[in-house]
Image: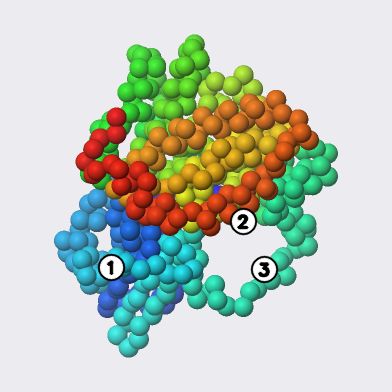
Amino acid sequence: MFKIGVGPSSSHTLGPWNAMLHFINEKIAHPDKIQKIRVELFGSLSKTGIGHGTDIAILLGLSGEIPRFIDTDLIGAKIQDIKASKRIKIKGSFPCSFEYDQDLIFKSESLPYHPNALRITVDLGLEKISEIYYSVGGGFIEVDSEIHTPSINLSANLPEVITEYSVKKAKDIIGYCELMNHAKISDFVIQRELQWQTEQETLSKAFEIWDVMKECIFKGCHTEGILPGGLDVHRRAKKIADRLLFDTAYESVDDWILAIRKKQHPHPDIFKWVSCFALAVNEQNASFGRVVTAPTNGAAGVIPAVLMYYVCFSEHFKEEHIARFLLTAGQVGILFKINATISAAMGGCQAEIGVSSAMAAAALTECIGGSFRQALVAAEIAMEHHLGMTCDPVGGLVQIPCIERNSMGAIKAINAAYLAIETQPENSKVDLDEVILAMWETALDMNHKYKETAEGGLALQIPMGLSEC
């Protein structure tokens, strides 16, 4: 559920990027023979692709650039070089003709399987190879030719113990945690991961994710200016952070966090900090900065902001719980991916901010002493109060209302956690499985123009070029 990548969108940027990497690495045996490339975008990828950087992602993917490692400061120069030269180096080594205005095509129609679809076709001289990809949210992709092949029992060749930890519903988590003497959700995740890696490896990977998250927050809180895209949106995180911390000296991100923890903060300032953390991440995301999909790029600020709240302001803070926070959050996110969607093009913003808020709420609840049942209650509360949220990005950009929504989702997650701590789970009238089902049914009923098309709602009310105040 957590991928290190580049903004601004997991479904419109990271997914198409991953699709291009999959195609040139898995479908093309002789990239040196490619004479021509044609990429067609459909549905939501076409309608908001420019604003979400889909075109940029495709060019970088074909060039063999890896989202996790690319120098984000060089992206602009790389794209300009491809456009100016009308050539692209496949996998960074094999030159091929590519004219941006002719070989990258934005189609008006949608494909039936998923609204985020693209087709790539390459001419090898003696033959042509074509494949359709679907970007299904969170950077995950599906390949059309593999969707329609007979299903394979993936567990058939796996050790039997792995199938014993199958989780599809929240009730499955409850069952496992009860069998493990009322263990925390993170305990269950660690136990399951032992089938593939040691506990230390699991925790180390979680801390690696946290390192990227906190660096993203730090950079966002120390960068000012206007976001790209034409909406003239001014960055706010730096000004907020500067006002709250005044002239405190620090030399690194860890020093900065320590300075925040040491300072006495009145209650309103804590809320300002949470919003600041979330804004910082999504301002970086909107600027093609390095972020962690959590579970998407558009919602990348919620979980880091709530985790930073725990690190900086919670009396329950323990450093070893940082990894467990992310493990619990990830497990809750999986439930939504399996039983509903984490794609705004499929489910509206409830599928992004709503899911991330639920993930963060469950994780914070565990870290402040809640039981596994209370953690699931927190996730239910958070999602329940995001049901029906539309995705209507102004100008097709992940800026208005997306950046502010991350701060709102973070605040809701914290509130949900403290409500859950005061809740007797047996008295809860709605469980997490039920609210996930309600979310999915709402997604299916939602009008298409409120699903990341920029064809309805706020997107029609705000003209391009108007600054967010």
Q: Are marks 1 and 3 in contact (CB under 8 Å)?
A: no
Sequence-wise first label, 1 or 2: 1
In space, the residues marked 1 and 2 are separated at their CA atoms by 32 Å
Kind of residue indicated by mark 2: Ile
State the image coordinates of residue 468 (x, y, percent, origin top left). 29, 34
| Number of the label disc, if any, that sits on residue 154 | 3
Residue in the foreground of this view, choosing between 163 and 394 = 394
Sequence-wise first label, 1 or 3: 1
Q: Residues within 10 Å of mark 1 (few under 14, many from 20)?
A: some
Residue at x 78%, y 47% (from the top left corner):
176
State the image coordinates of residue 192 (x, y, percent, origin top left). 71, 50
The residue at which mark 2 appears reads as 338
Residue at x 73%, y 36% (from the top left corner):
428
In space, the residues marked 1 and 3 are separated at their CA atoms by 36 Å
Q: Quadrant of the C terminus?
A: top left
- 5 w.r.t. 118: above or below: above
